[in-house]
Image (cartoon, helix red, strand yellow):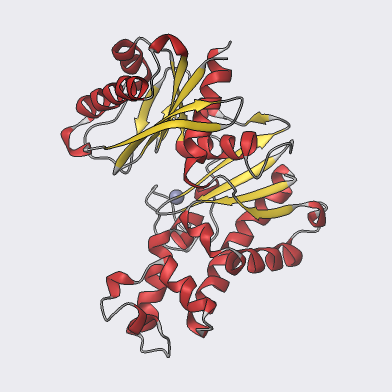
Amino acid sequence: MKHFIGIDMGGTNIKTGIVDLSAGEVVHASVTPTLGRLGHEAVMGRIADQILETIQEGGFSTADIGGVGVGVPGVLDLDQGLVLFLPNLPGNWRNVALRRTLEAKTGLPAALLNDARAITYGEWKFGAGKGVDTIACFTLGTGIGGGLVIEGRLHLGIGGTGGELGHQCIDPNGPQCGCGGRGCLESLVSGPAIAALGVRAVLQGRTTSLGSLAGADLNNITPELIWQAARQGDPVANEIYELVGDYLGVAVSNILVTVGPRKVILAGGVAGAGDLLLNPIRRRIRLQVFMMPADQVEVVIASLGANAGILGVAAWAAQKLAK
Ligand SMILES: [Zn+2]
């Protein structure tokens, strides 16, 4: 079986991995800065160059590679292979023919997928969701992404836009969300939203170790610093994760009753909070969900770590390009 390439196209770095799909492993990988300020043509050129360099560095030739999957942090038209909207990259990414450009520059067939759907597919193929027919995955980080696998198939919706679990409304009177909506899950539990809760507690003069842990620079207050404080027994930090976990629990409950997944997976950096999130999520599910057997649903932390997206989008390209 040929190897496939998976690309994690981030706002800061582009990570490229050569994936052995039968082993579910990245066998060679490289990282290069995205340099998004140079514009979309330059970024696409950098991705194509990196694909060819990574193949060579790994001791492969293009004939060994079945195709390229690109995990893109934005809204796509999967049928046309277009990028419609990339909120986290500068430049004009509206209606950019990313798939066709990469195919022309590398001579390899390519497939695009939203980055959170790539992580979902990776966790389902190789990680915490392996062998489970229906899963939901939340990616918790600077933004909140998501994805669904329903009865053994990645759910795509219109042009691949289905599964934006982070933009379900939790509070219609809540904060403005970056997407244009109001009170989305993302506006309440993103990394910056969690950090802002910590900053506010310090500024309000509440009794908490967060100020001293941050070394008097409030910019040092991150979700990770807050969960460290919570584990050391800081009551304010614990309260923050109770609140964030409860919001997530509302979102998970919505997915339980609409989709009926057997497993819900939390991926991304903020999922490092572990039980600090899982406990309030499970509590909210017990209070909220009665119309499906919630006791049969596992809520777990993802297992693949930072390679989930590369593995997932490579596997996605393999199955998409086989048709
Ligand atoms: Zn939103």
Quarter of the rendering occupied by the N terminus = top right
> At which x and y percent is residue 308?
52, 40
Up-down relation of residue 1 to residue 13 (above or below): above
Q: Quadrant of residue 170?
A: bottom right
Residue found at x 53% / y 54%: 169
Residue found at x 38% / y 22%: 82
Looking at this view, name the residue that lies furthest to the front. 59
> At which x and y percent is residue 159?
50, 25
Residue found at x 36% / y 86%: 204
Q: Nearer the viewer, residue 99 or 259?
A: 99
User: Can residue 317 be seen in the rendering of this structure?
Assistant: yes
Residue found at x 25% / y 27%: 46
Q: Nearer the viewer, residue 318 or 133?
A: 318
Q: Nearer the viewer, residue 36 or 172?
A: 36
User: Can residue 184 be seen in the rendering of this structure?
Assistant: no
> At which x and y percent is residue 56?
33, 19
